[in-house]
Image (cartoon, helix red, strand yellow):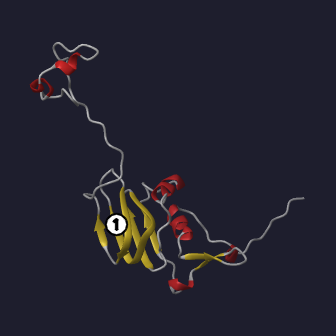
Amino acid sequence: GASAVIVPRTRFAPVKKCNDLLLLRSDAYVITDDFRPVLNPACGGAAPVVALDSKKYKMVGQLEEATKDGVPSLVDCKRLTIKGVVRMGRSTRFVGDVSITNKSDEAKFISGKIENATLDVSEEVGLGALKPTVVATAPIAGQKPGTSGLRKKTKEFMSENYLN
C-alpha cells in the first residue's frame, strides 16, 4: 500500500552544501505567492556562484554562526569566494566578483558594500574571543590574605607581575 509523491523540481531549490543554503537564504532568491523559491529577476537569469571554504562551512551551524547578524545581499553578486572564518550580516552587500580570504584563526567581520574586490582580511582586527596566555608567577614576600598588600610601597606594586 505504499505510494510515491512526485514533486517537480520547480517546487524547490536543491540544497546540498552550505553554499546553496546561503544563496537560497539571500535576496538572490524570492519566495512566490505559492511558496516556491525562484531566482530573483534582478539577478538577470543567472544565480551567483558561491564557494565557501569547505572546511570552515561544512556544517549548517557554522553557516548560522557566520550569518548570525543576518544574511548578506547577493542579488548583484556574480561570484563569491570565501576562504577562512568570515562573519557577515544584513549590512553586507556583495557586488560583482568578490573573493575574501582570512588565514587567521580569528573570525573577521565584513560589512558594507564590497564590489569586484579581492580582500585578504587576515591582519584585520577580529571578533574572536581573547586567547589565554600563561604568565609565570611567584609568591611575593610578605603578602598575606586581607589588606596587607594595601600597605606596600608603590615600588612594590610596580614590580613585574604584581598586578596582572
Looking at this rendering, what residue extends furthest in the left direction? 155
Residue 40: x %, y % from top left: 56, 81
Q: Quadrant of the C terminus?
A: top left
Residue 88: x %, y % from top left: 42, 63
Q: Nearer the viewer, residue 94 or 59?
A: 94
Q: Nearer the viewer, residue 53 or 89?
A: 89
At a point 18% along the width and 26% down the height, the residue shown is 162
Q: Nearer the viewer, residue 28 or 45?
A: 28
Q: Is residue 56 above or below residue 157?
A: below
Q: Is residue 5 above or below residue 54?
A: below
Residue, disc 1: 100
Q: SS at mark 1? A: strand
Q: Quadrant location of residue 14?
A: bottom right
Q: Quadrant location of residue 96?
A: bottom left
Residue 143: x %, y % from top left: 21, 15
Looking at this rendering, what residue extends furthest in the bottom direction? 44
Other residues around mark 1 within 10 Å, as few (<14) / some (14–19) / many (≥20)? many
Looking at this rendering, what residue extends furthest in the right direction? 1
At a point 37% along the width and 60% down the height, the residue shown is 109
Residue 29: x %, y % from top left: 57, 75
Q: Quadrant of the N terminus?
A: bottom right
Left or right: residue 19 compared with residue 4: left
Left or right: residue 72 compared with residue 135: right
Looking at the picture, which amino acid does disc 1 mark? Ile
Q: Quadrant location of residue 21?
A: bottom right
Left or right: residue 89 compared with residue 130: right
Q: Nearer the viewer, residue 95 or 162?
A: 162
Q: Is residue 30 above or below residue 124?
A: below
